[in-house]
Amino acid sequence: MTMPTGGSAPLAEALPAHGVALLPPDAPDPDALLVRAIDLPRLLLETAASLPLLVIDGPADPRARAALLDAGAADVLTDPADPAELAARLRALVRTRRMPPIACADLTVDLVDRKAERGGKSLPLHPREFAVLGELARHRDRPVDRVALFRAVWRRRFDPGTNVVAVTVSRTRAKVDHGFARPLIHTIGGAYMLSDAAVAMA
């Protein structure tokens, strides 16, 4: 298990004894990020909802911790945290990520390694585009409306009234469907759906 950490030195020194290998903050392809509450909003934007974020210095107030979870944290622990409990929670987070790739026709979406291929070729998706595709893949053959997609990918609880979702879906669709006879990303009213079935575009 690997994760960059912004936690305290004593905690970083204790975690390896419980099966957690720590990497520098700029290391590639971590399994999870251990972050401070103050850094959560910025990291949610940078990771585009594709990486579990465990908040280590969460507040003692249960309502405040619930707010962090609603904002997009995968888990929250108050500081100081017990190394054994923290390591167990990290292992649980990683286990939930060990899922097989999702297939739709000749498209494969790997939510663990955050990669997508179609026709055997890798798709050059930006983090936000992959997050959109991943959310559609999780709900394959079911429409995901604009608001739900905005909440899942941008981690916001309100609609900003912009076309950011439509623009990102359009860019994602261009990379997923361009050059292929069968489109897989469909627009149905105010919703989007990943499906290999024939769907009337709206």
Image (cartoon, rainbow, N blue to C red):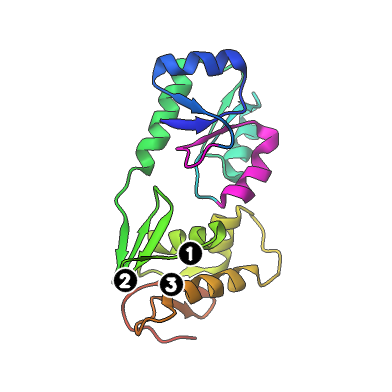
Q: Do we see residue 160 in this rendering?
A: yes
In the displayed structure, 139 sits above or below 49; it is: below
Mark 1 / mark 3, whichever is N-terminal: 1
Q: Is residue 181 magenta?
A: no
- Horizontal side of 80 relative to 201 (left or right) equals right
In the displayed structure, 198 sits above or below 9; it is: below
Mark 3 = which residue? 176
Q: Which mark is residue 119?
A: 2
| Measured Cα–Cα span from mark 1 to mark 3 | 9 Å
Mark 1 = which residue? 124
Q: Which residues are magenta?
A: 27-48
Q: Nearer the viewer, mark 3 or mark 2?
A: 2
- Please state which amino acid type lies under the numbered disc 3: Val
- Please state which amino acid type lies under the numbered disc 2: Gly
- Horizontal side of 57 relative to 31 (left or right) equals right
Mark 3 / mark 2, whichever is N-terminal: 2
Q: Is residue 38 magenta?
A: yes
What residue do we see at 49% from left, 13% from top?
14
Q: Nearer the viewer, mark 1 or mark 3?
A: 1
**Residue 62 on image: x %, y %:** 61, 29
Secondary structure beneath dot 2 equals loop
Q: Do we see residue 139 in this rendering?
A: no
Q: Tag 2: Cα neighbours inside 10 Å, few (<14), some, or many (≥20)?
A: few
**Hey, which quadrant is residue 110 in on the image?**
bottom left
Q: Tag 3: Cα neighbours inside 10 Å, few (<14), some, or many (≥20)?
A: many
Secondary structure beneath dot 1 equals loop
